[in-house]
Image (spheres, rainbow, N blue to C red):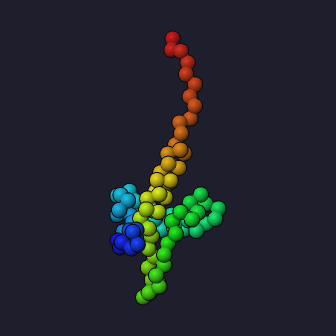
Amino acid sequence: MIHHDGHDYGQAADIARQLGTDITAERVRDWARRSRNPKDKLHGLLPGRHIPGQGRGTTWYRLTDAAQVERATRLERRGQRRARPVELTHAA
């Protein structure tokens, strides 16, 4: 993690470690891909800052942006698990 201009930045693995044991680096990268898709509800929420370098370079993400995306996806998943309506009848 690096601190720059009042914000914490990290690569996908760093961000995953900061957000908790159930978040993986692949999940952070998936959020970043979804963030680039204008048709996705996460569009624009997790922009990466790519720094060219040896090999493919590195991509850094802002920790506060990633935390916001995590919260949004957790609430989204929670809403999908709604209980189905059940009919109750009197017992004899």
Residue 13 seen in this snapshot? no
Q: Residue at x 35, y 62 (%)?
A: 18
Q: Residue furthest right?
A: 39
Up-down: is 68 above or below 36? above
Q: Residue at x 44, y 87 (%)?
A: 53
Up-down: is 9 above or below 68? below
Q: How many marks?
A: 0
Q: Is residue 80 left or right of residue 16?
A: right
Name the quadrant of the N terminus: bottom left
Q: Residue at x 36, y 72 (%)?
A: 3
Q: Position of residue 7 (x, y in %)?
A: 40, 68
Up-down: is 90 above or below 64? above
Q: Residue furthest top?
A: 92
Q: Residue at x 53, y 39 (%)?
A: 82
Q: Residue furthest front?
A: 5
48 or 91: nearer the eye?
48
Q: Is residue 15 left or right of residue 40?
A: left
76 or 26: nearer the eye?
76
User: Residue 14, located in which quarter of the rendered image?
Assistant: bottom left
Q: Position of residue 77 (x, y in %)?
A: 51, 49
Residue 7 seen in this snapshot? yes
